[in-house]
């Protein structure tokens, strides 16, 4: 079998199992996914940063950076550069724009439980740049979000 096709099928099957579990979780009144959870779905997928611009209202050109998953053919986040729009992530655009067309990856660090049980640190999903790791072996950290503890159990233990 063609290996690309096998990868696509394995990805689709994993997504299917994950979403079935998530639906079941919602039917039991579980909380909905947050941003970090939505990104964690695309762990190990081929994510890329794209720059985009278009003419918005008032003929103003709107410039954006898109976080896109090539494996799922889905845009995950949009970061707007315009200063006349109250963007959700006004500073994240400036941070991500230099890394457009670099090799980026999503990485996940698992939840850690401290000994006294009172300090549980949620897991974190991070976007890192592999191209910009010249000074150290550690990829440059670009952006991250916490993941929900229930989501890790639900999605990462399939
Ligand atoms: Zn994906
Ligand atoms: Zn970079």
Image: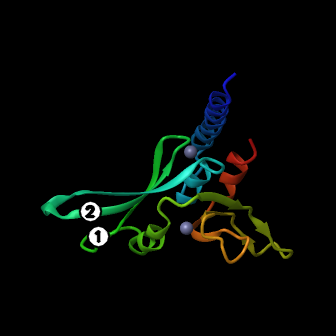
Instruction: Tell me: is circle 2 under 8 Å from ligand 2.
Output: no
Q: Nearer the viewer, residue 99 or 146?
A: 99
Residue 68 x, y percent position in the rendering: 48, 51
Label 2: which residue? 62
Residue 144 x, y percent position in the rendering: 58, 67
Q: Residue at x 66, y 25 (%)?
A: 2
Q: Residue furthest front?
A: 134
Q: Secondary structure at mark 1?
A: loop
**Residue 10, label in figure:** none
Q: Quadrant of the C terminus?
A: top right
Quadrant position of ligand 2? bottom right
Q: Nearer the viewer, residue 18 or 99?
A: 99
Residue 130 x, y percent position in the rendering: 63, 63
Q: Quadrant of the N terminus?
A: top right
Q: Secondary structure at mark 2?
A: strand
Does residue 32 appear in the picture of this structure? no
Q: Residue at x 61, y 47 (%)?
A: 45
C-beta proximity under 8 Å, tags 2 and 1: yes
Residue 27 x, y percent position in the rendering: 58, 39
């Amino acid at each position: 079998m063609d290996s690309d096709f096998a990868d696509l099928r394995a990805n689709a099957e994993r997504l299917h199992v994950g979403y079935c579990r998530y639906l079941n979780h919602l039917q039991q009144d579980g909380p909905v996914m947050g941003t970090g959870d939505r990104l964690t779905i695309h762990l190990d997928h081929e994510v890329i940063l794209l720059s985009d611009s278009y003419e918005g209202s008032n003929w103003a050109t709107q410039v954006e950076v898109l976080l896109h998953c090539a494996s799922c053919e889905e845009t995950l986040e949009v970061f707007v550069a315009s200063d006349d729009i109250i963007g959700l992530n006004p500073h994240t655009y400036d941070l991500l724009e230099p890394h457009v067309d670099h090799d980026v990856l999503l990485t996940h660090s698992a939840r850690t439980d401290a000994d006294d049980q009172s300090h549980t640190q949620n897991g974190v999903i991070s976007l890192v740049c592999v191209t910009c790791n010249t000074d150290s072996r550690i990829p440059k950290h670009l952006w991250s979000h916490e993941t929900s503890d229930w989501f890790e159990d639900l999605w990462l233990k399939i």
